[in-house]
Image: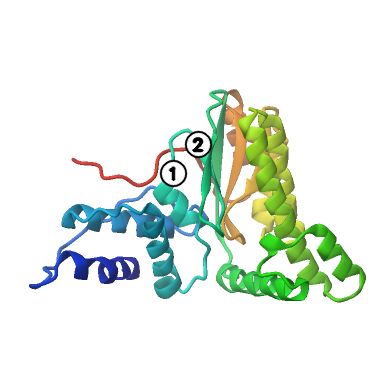
Amino acid sequence: MGQLRQRSDRMLPKCVPIGIVVGFDAVILSSVPLGGGLSSSASLEVATYSFIEAITGNITIQLVHKAMVCQKAEHIFAGVPCGIMDQFISVMGIEGHALLIDCKSLNYDPVPLTESNYVFLITNSNVNHELSSSQYQLRRYQCEEASDLLNVPSLRSATMDNLSKVHSNGEINEITYKRARHVITEIERTKTAADVLKRGDYKTFGQLMNDSHNSLRDDFEVSCPELDQLVELARRVPGVLGSRMTGGGFGGCTVTLVDKTAINSVVNVINSEYKGNPKFYTVLPSCGAKIVKL
């Protein structure tokens, strides 16, 4: 309940300047699998924030601030030094769109995802290797180390030319080089993905998904055999444009862009060849958190 406490600590003193804050019982019902890399923590944080807005009547106008408070809850109470992306999209989501988020300026650009012939198929591997938390923090440290070696505030400001130069000069070790290469190329892939989606080029977008997974597997090394198998099985099926892992890695889910007519084929192939116990969800982009009155 750290998320609830963090949100309450920030909000209730403004909403209830005098008197006693009365406790309450609450029930959390969710269809988001825990530990699956689908932002279950961020969704709980944002839902809790929205719930307290509803019961106090104090609605946050600055939605970016709302996302930042939720991110801080994850930092303090979950002990995870996460970025802002998960909380941001949980607050700012727009139906029928992806968001291209600038995590430095916190500006964002809606990107249409309205092609009716394709959907995203989420496949939960139902494995979660214990390395995920410690390795996430290690990757962050390695990226910060690379930034220092490149003399930039973050890898957002680096280029492959800069990185290749320090690598050829022997100024960076191979592991740190690979971590930085993933981040730099992933930033470029993300920009390109937004451009091709705006043109309705889903085929190229799917290839970028494939390239992203390959980089996460080979350079960032946060995939695992189960995720790799799910991705490879999905890519075999005609009608699949791209497939990649999602989340922090070492287990969790894959995301596959697939023609609607091929969904059953993907599910059948995975069920017949994957040794684990997968679970499937078909999803479309929706709006951010909102109050639903019963």
SS at badge 2: strand
- Is residue 121 among the parts visible in the rendering? yes
Residue at which label 1 appears: 93
Q: Gap in Å between the C-alphas at discs 2 and 1?
A: 8 Å
**On screen, 256 above or below 199?**
below
Residue under the point 29% across and 55% down? 60
> Residue farthest to the left?
19
> Is 79 on the left-hand or right-hand side of 14?
right
Residue 166 percent coordinates (x, y): 86, 70
Question: Taking the image as drawn, is residue 272 in sight?
Answer: no
Give amino acid for label 1.
Gly
In this view of the protein, which residue sits in the foreground, 266 or 199? 199
Q: Is residue 42 above or below residue 290?
A: below
Residue 59 location in percent, x, y? 25, 53
Q: How is the image coloured?
A: rainbow
Residue found at x 66% / y 40%? 193
Q: Which residue is mark 2?
A: 97
In the rendered image, the quadrant that contains the N terminus is bottom left
Q: Are marks 2 and 1 in contact (CB under 8 Å)?
A: yes
Quadrant of the snapshot with the C terminus: top left
- Amino acid carrying label 2: it is His
In the image, what residue occupies the spot 18% across and 64% down? 15
Q: Is residue 72 above or below residue 64?
A: below
Tell me residue 36's x, y (percent): 51, 55
Q: In the drawing, does residue 210 fall left or right of residue 170?
A: left
- Crowding around mark 2 (Cα neighbors within 10 Å: few <14, some 14 to 19, many 20+) is some
Left or right for 285, reference 73: right
